[in-house]
Image (spheres, grey):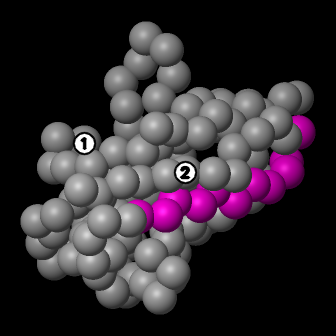
Amino acid sequence: QVQLVESGGGLVQAGGSLRLSCVLSGRAFTRYAMGWFRQNPGKERECVAAINWAGSITFYADSVKDRFTISRDNAKNTVYLQMNSLKREDTADYYCAADRNPGFSPQSTESLYDYWGQGTQVTVSS
């Protein structure tokens, strides 16, 4: 059974940085494309970044381009989300997810992801 465990969330001032980590256990990590999503109460979950199995193709939401970087270390079964120049509107619960049927490029559609972590909270203060 696949399990995803996120870490690295917390409280940070606007303009600061955080790095989220997500470890996958239970299956071969390289089988999965990985994504980071975020959600606020009453709002839809949105994909902020995704990465293919090899780490060679990435996707970013327009709202985070040039500020966030997704990467993966297949030897450590871990995907990362480096978040720089954080803004108050980045405040949300962040979730990592695994897509077990990845295509050539990583997907941003929530319904295509099969496994989800429990989430980690990021709060950006002004």
Residue 90 higher or lower than 102, as above or below? above
First in residue order: circle 2 vs circle 1:
2
Residue annotated with mark 1: 110
Q: Is residue 63 magenta?
A: no
Q: Residue at x 64, y 34 (%)?
A: 121
Residue 108 visible in the shown view: no
The span from disc 2 to disc 1 (Cα, nearest Å) is 17 Å
Residue 104 image position (x, y, % from top left) = 16, 78
Residue 40: percent from left, percent from top: 51, 22
Give the amino acid at mark 2: Glu
Residue range in magenta is 13-24
Name the front one of labels 2 and 1.
2
Name the main secondary structure of what is drawn in magenta. strand
Residue 24, x across and y down, in percent: 41, 64
Alpha-carbon neighbours of circle 2 within 10 Å: few (<14), some, or many (≥20)?
many
Q: Residue furthest toward the top?
A: 42
Crowding near the residue tagged with mark 1, few <14, some 14–19, many ≥20 C-alpha atoms within 10 Å:
some
106 with respect to 7 (left or right):
left
Badge 1 element: helix
Residue 102 vs residue 67: left or right?
Answer: left
Query: At 49% from the left edge and 64% from the top edge, which residue is drawn?
Result: 23
Q: Residue at point 84% right, 29% down?
A: 125
The answer to which image quadrant residue 84 occupies is bottom right
Q: Position of residue 67 (x, y in %)?
A: 65, 60
Amino acid type at mark 1: Glu
| Rendered-image quadrant of the N terminus | bottom left
